[in-house]
Image: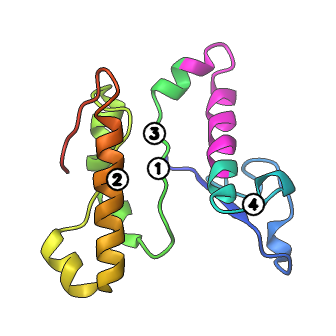
Amino acid sequence: RIHTFISDDSPQHESAQPQPFGSVKGEYVHVFRQSEEHLGKGGGLRQSIQHAIDFIGEQRPDSPQAALEESAIVFTEPEKTDLMNHLGEVTKPLLAGQMDVIVPRRKDDSFRATYPIEQYHSESFGNLHFNGLAQKFDGFKGLSI
């Protein structure tokens, strides 16, 4: 099952009223208003991840850590619709305990040809930077997908 957690910071959207899990647009979509404490860059993402962690833990109150270890939290943006077609492949190493973090990447030739050069350079540099930081952790395993 794939649950979706949506943090909405648009003040004019009535649909973003806080709702209990499973009560908005079906049992797998969780919509909530972005809270004051999660404002700023990345605030909605941090809030959504926290909601996902809480939800996963509530599914197995006797063993919330085990529930987290058997789950995957995936961040994507609305325009990245094709990622859902590859979700099984992307999360398989995570769910098998082979990886802790997975960052899919674009095919270099099509990325360079179809996106603004500034975006190509900033994402490529960001990926190299974070990969370099991750290499400093004991037990880090890298894998290209």
Relative placement, left or right, of 134 versus 39 is left
Residue that mark 3 sits on: 72
Disc 1 is placed on an element classified as loop
Amino acid of disc 4? Val
Question: For mark 1, what is the residue?
Answer: 74
Q: Residue at x 51, y 72 (%)?
A: 78
Which residue position holds label 2? 87
- The answer to whether the residue labelled 4 contacts the one labelled 2, judged by CB atoms less than 8 Å apart, is no
Q: Residues at badges 1 and 2 in contact (C-beta under 8 Å)? A: yes
- Residue 62 lies within the magenta run: yes
Q: Earlier in the sequence, mark 3 or mark 4?
A: 4
Inter-mark Cα distance, 2 to 3: 10 Å
Q: Position of residue 13 (x, y in %)?
A: 82, 78
Find disc 4 in the rendering and name its residue. Answer: 24
Which element type, helix, strand or loop, lies under badge 4? loop
Picture coordinates of residue 44 (x, y %)? 68, 58
Residue 100 at x, y percent in the picture: 38, 32
In the displayed structure, 15 sits above or below 37; it is below
- Whether residue 41 is situated above or below residue 88 in the rendered picture: below
For mark 3, give the secondary structure: loop
Spatial CA span between label 4 and label 2: 23 Å
Part of the protein shown in magenta: 48-65
Element assignment for label 2:
helix
